[in-house]
Amino acid sequence: MTPDDEEPTAEELEEAERLARALERGHAPGGVPEDALGAAALLRFSKDGGALEPERAERILEEALSRARPPVSKPRRRYTLLGLLGLAAAGAAAFLLVVKTQAPEAAALLPSPPRELLEAQLAAATAKDLDEQTAKNTALAALDDQTARYRGVLYATLRERYGR
């Protein structure tokens, strides 16, 4: 305000109002001259040492709390994705468990090895201790013959069961 003027102009009144708001809030949002704000802050500080009155501090706190927004919760896609992957893994494990437990009783359907095959295996196992090469060869030939017979019966049973 200039000494010549009796009435302040509209611009001066607006600037004074912005300065008062800036001093009240403790910061200048914009449009307030820095030199005027600094001078007013020095005058205020010299008066009370910068201490806030309890009522003013309460008003500032209430205003800040009224303008505060709760934090926006972010979608928890990461946890949702991990949960879906866990469910898929559990489903796959359950599927495999059900498939494996429903296997046919193949061992009950297979023919038992004949006594001759078991005797040929025993003879071949004890023939290792014999010194004669011909005895070893004879025991191994008998084992091979009995194994081929049993294998034929086994494959025939499997063909009947599975149609292949």
Image (tube, grey):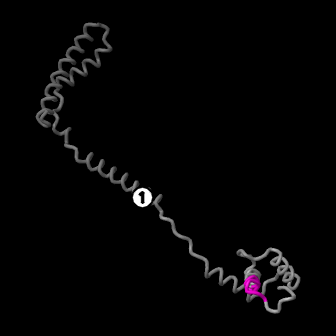
Residue, far bottom: 6
Q: For this rendering, which residue is in front, 23 or 121? A: 23
Q: Amino acid at mark 1?
A: Gly
Residue 2 visible here: yes
User: Which residue is identified by label 1?
Assistant: 83
Front residue of this view, candidates 9 and 72: 9
9 part of magenta stretch = yes
Query: Which of these two is toward me, 20 or 162?
Result: 20
Vertical position of residue 141 compared to residue 38: above or below: above
Determine whether the residue tagged by mark 1 lies in a helix, strand or loop: helix
Magenta stretch, main secondary structure class: helix
Residue 24 in view of the camera: no
Span highlighted in magenta in the image: 8-16
Residue 43 x %, y %: 86, 82
The extreme front residue here reads 4
Quadrant containing the N terminus is bottom right
For the residue carrying disc 1, how many other residues have a C-alpha within 10 Å: few (<14), some (14-19), or many (20+)?
few
